[in-house]
Amino acid sequence: MKNEEKSIDRTNRQLIAVRDVQDALSSGATSIATAANCVVTPSARDLMQQHGIELVMNGSGNLQSNASGAPAAPVASASAGQSTATFRAPNTRLFSTPEAEAIKKEICAVGRKLWLRQFVDGNGGNISYRIGPNEVLCTPTLVSKYDLTPGDISLTDINGVQVAGSKARTSELLLHLEIYKAVPEAKAVVHCHPPHATAYAITGRVPPNLVIPEFEVFVGKVAISPYETPGTKAFAETVLPYVRQHNTVLLSNHGIVCWADTVTHAEWYAEVLETYCWTLMLAQQLGAPISHISEKHGDDLLAIKKTLGLPDIRFDTSRMKECQLSDLEVPSSIALQPTPCDGPPGSPSGADLESLVKSVTDAVMEAIGGK
Ligand SMILES: [Zn+2]
């Protein structure tokens, strides 16, 4: 600790909230003593970081570790450190390698895209990249994604303890970390609140499938996770039943989260889902039934998807019975009842479909080539 200063005693409490931090501030304390298993709310954590208040767990000494000596001291909440997985100590040198510098720029570019497309507002949304087994680059709390600069990005370990960077990491990082721990292929996570996709999320519905080829290939079936308070471990864990077989999840009453091999690709999936939801809503306003791609042609799209290594619950034949191409993850969540798949009026002709499939294949191949 920098000074021999006052600490307020909260060792009899299970939860540290904003009020406790305010008590510490008003009494001139620079640390809060807590019980070993206490949980810190995200807003309390943010306030502690803003004012440099430290958290000292009973018997465990100063919880704040700052291996890089960076000015923003992290606060490790109990909720961030309960993983059973073991990882070696984080390698802080990964924070400033040429690869890290390039990824920080990519994160900023993606942040600006999210803001320009109105997928985030205020300081909403967050982006991360798993640069090592126990090292994650992530965006800071309380910064608009439009204003991000590479110097804003911090480095944390896989449990969320910040080890480098001058700004406090996002309080939503736990969501990203649960995905990284559950899906080894996930290297990047983007969380945002695009309005049309979020409209589905607040009605508890998922969009139907077999309407637009690009959506089938890049996203496919979307799951919807139950609501929990953002920033908590309980919230982060809501996506666990879905993330291995879905690269995009609607978060009930909140927004969406996407994972991919790169930050750029994770943002693409957000764009694809948002545009798809928007298009479905526009089509609904026309009043005519929405036509669907046949399941046979859907199989062609799934075959393309398989070659890309993208996840889709429909690849899991053991679950195909409960989850057919055109049905949904949650039976009560049908947003637009799909019309019969074998030749509804207005279905694209075989030739149209061929050209659609070709255009998707071309786009995909170009994306792979440009990676
Ligand atoms: Zn959010």
Image (tube, grey):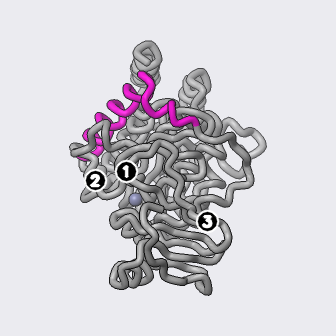
Report whether 278 appears left or right of 359.
Answer: left
Q: Is residue 239 visible?
A: yes
Give the Cα separation between the discs numbered 2 and 1.
17 Å
Q: Residue at x 52, y 72 (%)?
A: 40
Majority secondary structure in the magenta region: helix
Q: Nearer the viewer, mark 2 or mark 3?
A: 3
For residue 252, the mark is: none
Q: Which mark is residue 61?
A: 3
In the rendering, at what x and y percent does residue 339 appear? 49, 49
Say which of 30 and 159 sits in front.
Answer: 30
Q: Is residue 62 above or below residue 318?
A: below
The residue beneath circle 1 is: 71
Q: Earlier in the sequence, mark 2 or mark 1?
A: 1
Q: Secondary structure at mark 2?
A: loop
| Residue 151 in picture, x, y percent from top left | 31, 39
Given the image, on which type of amino acid does mark 1 rest?
Pro
Q: Is residue 328 left or right of residue 86?
A: left
Say which label, 2 or 3, has the lower sequence index. Answer: 3
Q: Quadrant of residue 245?
A: top right
Residue 354: in sight, yes or no? no
Q: The residue tagged with tag 3: helix, strand or loop?
A: strand
Give the Cα separation between the discs numbered 2 and 3. Answer: 31 Å
* Residue at the disc numbered 2: 143
Pointer 1 local density, CA inside 10 Å: few below 14, some 14–19, many at least 20: few
Total marks in image? 3
Query: Are dots 2 and 3 in contact, CB under 8 Å?
Result: no
Asked whether 237 falls inside the magenta stretch, the response is no
**Residue 219 percent across, percent down from the top left:** 49, 39
Q: Which numbered disc flags the more N-terminal residue, 1 or 3?
A: 3
Amino acid type shown at disc 2: Val
